Amino acid sequence: MSDILISAIICTHNRDTYLGAAIDSLLTQDFPGEFEVVVVDNGSSDRTCEVAKQRASNSRFKYVFEPTIGLSVARNTGAKVARAEILAYLDDDAVATPHWLQVLYDAYQTNTQLAIAGGKVTLLWPAGVEPPKWLSPGLAGNLGAYDLGDSLVYIETPGLTPRGLNYSLRRRFLEDIGGFDPQLGRVGKNLLSNEELQMTELALQGGWQVAYLPQALVAHNVAPERINRAWFFNRGWWQGISECYREQLAGKAGIAQLSLGSERLIRGLYKALKYLNDPAQSFDNLVYAYGQVGYLNAVIKGLLSNNRETSRGVGE
């Protein structure tokens, strides 16, 4: 049995600018027990390999190349390579505070029913850049911000699930559910998401617990290219598609999705107009409405695909 108590995993794709700081924040953790740092290079074409090799002399460090693009694929590869029972995932553009691993490890040691845990996330803005006036707290969450307060919270609503950039799991739970679902999670430049939400649903359904740990603090860099309205519209679009896919995986797909998505689209547009004097709230609702267009687009494609399969079955 491995002596490694906790494995810190970074899945990365073309983020050499931020990657070094992320790795170093893990290699210098204030953790008295044995731990390892695994970097999964998910098909990068930049200097990622070079950045990793600069840390290769550290005995805690391990580098693996995963050619199949996809965040969930990379996460599963990281879990296979890692040796510990507790798996802690940090994004490649984030920086963990010195006690991050200790806080996560202690939580699992004191609660054997804990399957998933994550912590507070603050935002690191580029030098000289202030948050735009049209950015609401809700949309800041799309940049990674996550704050449920300064006390331990056990998550009972999947929508409050910990952010994937500051995320940990018990290996036994991950293996029980068959790993991360490759149908969810980002692939290349698409912004498909909701894999953490699905994991929380599965954990709660299985009698496990999910926790928010405020002391497991991580800071997340805000990339300059994300500080524009177009990025948030694109993020909203993919959020809608992700929600549709999650419903399909849960067996909830069907014609009822059309009325649900349409109602939410109208509500979002109405609120965007209602709060025109509040730039942040108005834009938040406009992004929400645009996300419903993405949702409806995925619903219609799903219904048409099912109809074609049904027609082929009848023809045969």
Image (cartoon, rainbow, N blue to C red):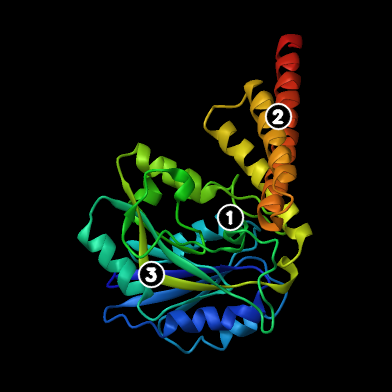
Tell us which disc is closer to us: 1 or 3.
Answer: 1
Helix, strand or loop for disc 2:
helix
Which residue is at 35% across, 78% downward? 99
298 over 234 or under it: above or below? above
Residue beneath disc 2: 262
In the image, taking residue 165 as reference, residue 101 lies left or right, namely: left
Q: Quadrant of the C terminus?
A: top right
Q: CA distance from mark 1 to mark 2?
A: 22 Å
Residue 263 vs residue 306, the one in the foreground: 263
Residue 233 vs residue 5, the one in the foreground: 233
Disc number placed over residue 309 in the picture, else none: none
Q: CA distance from mark 1 to mark 3?
A: 21 Å
13 over 21 or under it: above or below? above
Q: Position of residue 100 (x, y in %)?
A: 38, 74
| Residue 204 found in image quarter | top left
Q: Residue furthest front?
A: 277
- Label 3 neighbour load within 10 Å: few <14, some 14-19, many 20+: many
Residue beneath disc 3: 216
105 over 50 or under it: above or below? above
Helix, strand or loop for disc 3:
strand
Tell us which disc is closer to us: 3 or 2.
Answer: 2
Q: Quadrant of the N terminus?
A: bottom left
Q: Which comes sooner in the sequence, label 1 or label 3? A: 1
Residue type, mark 3 in image: Ala
Residue beneath disc 1: 138
Residue type, mark 1 in image: Gly
Q: Position of residue 283 (x, y in %)?
A: 71, 53
Residue type, mark 2 in image: Ser
In the image, taking residue 47 as reference, residue 22 lies left or right, namely: left
Marks 1 & 2, CB-CB < 8 Å contact: no
- Label 2 neighbour load within 10 Å: few <14, some 14-19, many 20+: some
- Label 1 neighbour load within 10 Å: few <14, some 14-19, many 20+: some
